[in-house]
Image: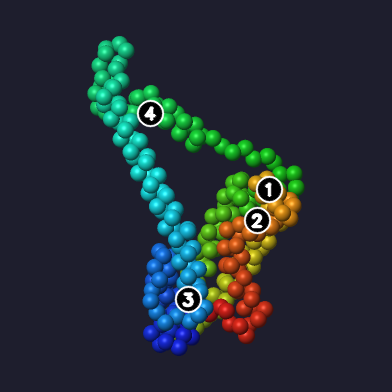
Amino acid sequence: SERHNPDAEVRDEFQSGGGAAWIVLLNLTGEYPIADYTLLGRLLCVVSSICAIGVFAIPTGICADGFGAVMDERDEKAEKRANNPVMCLKCQRNVDEMNGVKLPVGLDKAVEVVLKEAEEDTVELVEPPETLRQWVFQILNSKTELGDLVEKATLAVIVLNIVCFIISTEKSVMKAHPSWVGWFDTIEWITMILFTAEYGLRIWSCVENPKLHEPTCLGDTPHINHATSFYSIVDLLAILPFWIDVALPSINIMP
């Protein structure tokens, strides 16, 4: 939105992905740099700031508050343990002193350790798929070993796409290596086709998720529930500009 801003200072900051990265990071922290943005740029800044507050600032505060509560509870337990030490039934000596206060042998800590180990050893039982849609759902939601591999491959493709996009916006690099343009275009097409296929398969297989069958005013609509979820909207926004640019090149959404 700002690559063709009438203000030269603003326009120069948004000529490449790398050059604009610091401003984007400021928006993701909830900051709003004062500049003569275009109307579309201002709207995008407002939306990104709101998302930053909801996705980063508020969860960070909640996590910090929760961490503080856990530490307070830990200190309280330690204080109670110091005032009421665990004594050995045979020799009547302080168990903590016998172990150099290194091993958590208190009953409350022992129960906590056992529960934690049991939780780590718990493996979700996945029933064998009976249909192709169930198989696709299990893979896309990492419920099988193949699903874990697909998830890691998807993350690798996302990173590749981002790196190629940033490099392609650096005019000095592309001028020195003009042959890279064709490679980047090919990578962009392949990754966008993969992302679009993944989005479509998630919409198609979402009926296998029992959590999405909550009735709404439209009835039992798992497809709508999935399509209107936060991560599904993010996936759609990631692929939609590319296909709009392909269908309507005169709009010139993509750089």
Amino acid carrying label 1: it is Glu
Mark 4 crowdedness (10 Å alpha carbons): few <14, some 14-19, many ≥20: few
Residue at figure coordinates x 24%, y 23% from the top left? 97
Mark 1 crowdedness (10 Å alpha carbons): few <14, some 14-19, many ≥20: few
Amino acid carrying label 4: it is Lys
* Disc with the residue nearer the chain's start (3 vs 2): 3
Mark 2 crowdedness (10 Å alpha carbons): few <14, some 14-19, many ≥20: many
* Disc with the residue nearer the chain's start (3 vs 1): 3
Q: Give the spatial CA distance, label 1 vs label 2.
A: 11 Å
Which residue occupies the extreme front position in the image? 217
Q: Give the spatial CA distance, label 4 vs label 1.
A: 40 Å
Q: Position of residue 219 (x, y in %)?
A: 74, 52
Of the numbered discs in the image, which one, if any, rests on residue 214? 1
Q: Give the spatial CA distance, label 2 vs label 4.
A: 41 Å
Q: Nearer the viewer, mark 3 or mark 4?
A: 3
**Measured along the vertical axis of the image, is residue 32 above or below residue 59?**
below
Amino acid carrying label 2: it is His
Of the numbered discs in the image, which one, if any, rests on residue 42? 3
Of the numbered discs in the image, which one, if any, rests on residue 244? none
Residue underneath mark 4: 109
Q: Quadrant of residue 6?
A: bottom left
Image check: 233 left or right of 112?
right
Q: Nearer the viewer, mark 1 or mark 2?
A: 1
* Disc with the residue nearer the chain's start (2 vs 4): 4
Residue underneath mark 2: 226
Residue at figure coordinates x 28%, y 30% from the top left? 79
**Measured along the vertical axis of the image, is residue 205 above or below residue 237?**
above
